[in-house]
């Protein structure tokens, strides 16, 4: 069943908020969960699992689903029925899409809100924020949708390449050997209590964007960012140290930014659902708790991976590290 396309500006007889929904979804809610299940040939429980995996609350009796929702479920089930993946795998993929798109949508909206305010304050004013938002959505969404597909293909190719480049073990393609880095802003909680919301948002944006630039420069990858901290991985220990030094330079050396602590650990980690797990992840995070401001410390594994001709290392006094007992962190520097 094909989606019911609505006019570019949404149905004019509907409330402004619903017009905005129409313009984005391009399909008006007309089905309940039982009808979606009947149209797609799956059970009501499967419908609920997929909807929860996307990150939305369940609607049972309400007409909350669109023809586009039915088409999406049918598309998903077509490759389940073909045997490409089983239903549990399909749910996992759906969860990944849901989490990724939820964050991307919040990012897009927070970015475009400022543009809507500019439009309403200038010559492009429509007299209504909803009107300006409708115009902006109609202008931005079509090319942005194409950009999404392009970016997904590029990142998919990069992810497949990482499996080989990181030396994935043949018996377990989820396990890879990497260097893991954790960057943590110093005293962020206390600082955030002295800033207004816009200032906090600007600070986090600068921190995350600068970290992203440095990590990308050395072919690394940010696994997650938590506002005041960033977790990243690289294929190579030297690249990880270069990333850490770069973050200290662009964050810790900037008088307008808080100080930062860096910890690195190396070894095998497990990749699952876009995240990584294993002792190196925990060790890198713990090391930031004992690092000095604008300093990097590493574990012994990372120090051993650095060429002795280019790097010198110095063991620091042993100290208790939660979950690891007594640990001797290592300070490293270029010769």
Image (cartoon, rainbow, N blue to C red):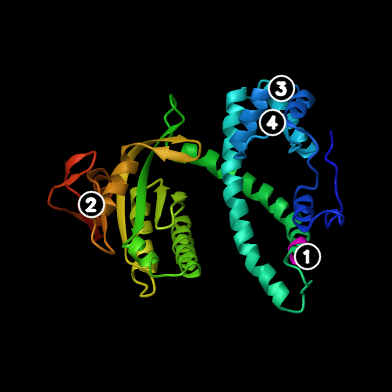
Whether residues under marks 3 and 2 lie with C-beta atoms below 8 angstroms apart, the answer is no
Residue drawn at x 65%, y 25% as measured from the top left:
46
Residue bearing mark 3: 42
Residue bearing mark 1: 131
**Magenta residue span:** 131-135
Q: Residues within 10 Å of mark 4 (few under 14, many from 20)?
A: some
Q: Residues within 10 Å of mark 3 (few under 14, many from 20)?
A: some
Which type of secondary structure does the marked residue at label 3 adopt? loop
Residue 335 forms part of the magenta stretch: no
Which percent across, then down, holds residue 118?
68, 74
Judged from this view, the residue extending furthest toward the left is 317
Q: Is residue 81 visible?
A: yes
Considering only order in the chain, which callout, 2 or 3, is on the residue closer to the N terminus?
A: 3
Q: Is residue 9 left or right of residue 252?
A: right
Which type of secondary structure does the marked residue at label 2 adopt? loop
Residue bearing mark 2: 308
CA gap between label 3 and label 2 equals 60 Å
Which percent across, then down, holds residue 110?
60, 61
User: Where, by quadrant of the figure, is residue 187 drawn?
Assistant: bottom left
Q: Residues within 10 Å of mark 2 (few under 14, many from 20)?
A: few
Considering only order in the chain, which callout, 2 or 4, is on the residue closer to the N terminus?
A: 4
Q: Is residue 31 left or right of residue 189?
A: right
Residue drawn at x 35%, y 61% as measured from the top left:
189
- Image position of 58 with respect to 150: above or below: above
Q: Quadrant of the C terminus?
A: bottom left
Which type of secondary structure does the marked residue at label 1 adopt? helix
Residue bearing mark 4: 60
- Image position of 46 with respect to 11: above or below: above
């Amino acid at each position: 069943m094909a989606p019911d396309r609505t006019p570019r500006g949404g149905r004019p007889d509907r409330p402004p908020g619903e017009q905005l929904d129409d313009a984005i979804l391009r399909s008006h809610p007309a089905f309940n969960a039982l009808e979606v299940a009947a149209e797609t040939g799956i059970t009501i429980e499967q419908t609920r699992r997929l909807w929860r995996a996307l990150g939305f609350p369940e609607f049972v009796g309400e007409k909350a689903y669109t023809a586009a929702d039915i088409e999406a479920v049918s598309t998903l089930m077509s490759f389940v029925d073909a045997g490409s993946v089983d239903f549990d795998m399909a749910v996992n993929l759906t969860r990944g899409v849901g989490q990724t798109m939820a964050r991307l949508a919040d990012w897009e909206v927070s970015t475009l809100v400022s543009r809507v305010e500019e439009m309403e304050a200038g010559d492009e004013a429509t007299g209504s924020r909803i009107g300006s938002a409708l115009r902006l959505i109609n202008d931005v969404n079509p090319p942005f949708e194409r950009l999404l597909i392009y970016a997904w293909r590029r990142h998919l190719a990069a992810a497949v390449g990482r499996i080989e480049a990181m030396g994935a073990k043949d018996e377990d393609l989820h396990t890879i050997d990497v260097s893991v880095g954790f960057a943590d802003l110093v005293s962020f909680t206390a600082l955030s209590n002295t800033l207004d919301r816009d200032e906090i948002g600007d600070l986090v944006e600068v921190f995350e964007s600068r970290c992203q630039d440095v990590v990308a420069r050395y072919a690394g990858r940010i696994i997650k960012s938590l506002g005041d901290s960033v977790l990243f991985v690289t294929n190579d220990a030297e690249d990880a140290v270069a990333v850490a030094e770069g973050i200290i330079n662009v964050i810790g050396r900037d008088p307008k930014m808080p100080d930062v602590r860096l910890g690195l650990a190396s070894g095998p980690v497990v990749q699952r659902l876009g995240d990584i797990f294993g002792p190196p992840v925990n060790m890198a995070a713990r090391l930031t708790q004992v690092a000095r401001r604008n300093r990097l410390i590493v574990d012994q594994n990372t120090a051993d991976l650095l060429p002795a001709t280019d790097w010198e290392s110095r063991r620091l006094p042993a100290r208790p590290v939660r979950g690891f007992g007594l640990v001797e962190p290592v300070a490293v520097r270029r010769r």
